[in-house]
Image (cartoon, rainbow, N blue to C red):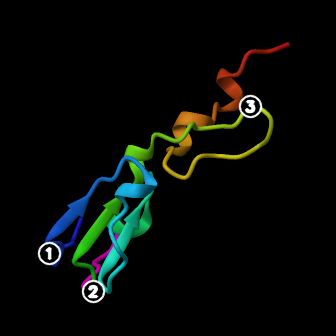
Amino acid sequence: MDLPGVEHVAMPRSRAELPSWTAGTAVLAGGTWIFSEPQPGISRLVDLAGFDWPPLMASAVDAGATKMTRAIWKPASSAKRV
C-alpha cells in the first residue's frame, strides 16, 4: 500500500453520511485496485464497507460492490454435488 498523501478516511454507514465529493477523493469498495500501486493524487478515501450491502441478491445475479469475491464464490471442487 503506497498512499502517503491520504489525510482522511471517511467510513459512512448511509447515503446521508457520504461526504461531498472533492478533488483527491477515492472510493473503496471491497477488494479495490487502489492499493495495488501508488496513488499520488489521493488525499481522502471513502470506504463503502459500512453500507453492509448483501453479497448476493436472492432474486437476481447481483453482487454487492463491497463484498469480496471469496464471500460469494465457491470453487467447483468444494460445491455440493447433486
Mark 2: amino acid: Gly
Q: Label 3: which residue?
A: 58
Q: Residue at x 37, y 77 (%)?
A: 21
Q: Residue at x 49, y 49 (%)?
A: 66
Mark 1: amino acid: Pro
Q: Is residue 37 magenta?
A: yes
Check disc 1: other Cα within 10 Å, few if <14, some if 14-19, many if 20+. few
Cα separation, mark 1 vs mark 3, equals 40 Å
Query: Are circles 2 and 1 on residues that touch, CB within 8 Å?
Result: no
On residue 41, the disc is: 2
Q: Label 1: which residue?
A: 4
Q: Secondary structure at mark 2?
A: loop
Query: Are circles 1 and 3 on residues that touch, CB within 8 Å?
Result: no
Which sits earlier in the primary sequence, circle 2 or circle 1?
A: 1
**Magenta part mainly helix, strand or loop?**
loop
Residue 57 sits above or below residue 51 on the image:
above
Q: Position of residue 31 (x, y in %)?
A: 44, 54
Mark in front: 3 vs 2 = 3
Left or right: 20 with respect to 44? right
Which sits earlier in the primary sequence, circle 3 or circle 2?
A: 2
Can residue 15 be seen in the rendering of this structure? yes
Q: Secondary structure at mark 1?
A: loop
Mark 3: amino acid: Ala
Nearest the viewer among 59 and 39 is 59
Q: Which residues, given as a range, are shown in magenta?
A: 36-41
Cα separation, mark 2 vs mark 1, equals 10 Å
Left or right: 51 with respect to 12? right
The residue at the far right in this view is 82
Which sits earlier in the primary sequence, circle 1 or circle 3?
A: 1
Nearest the viewer among 28 and 1 is 28
Q: Position of residue 45 (x, y in %)?
A: 29, 67
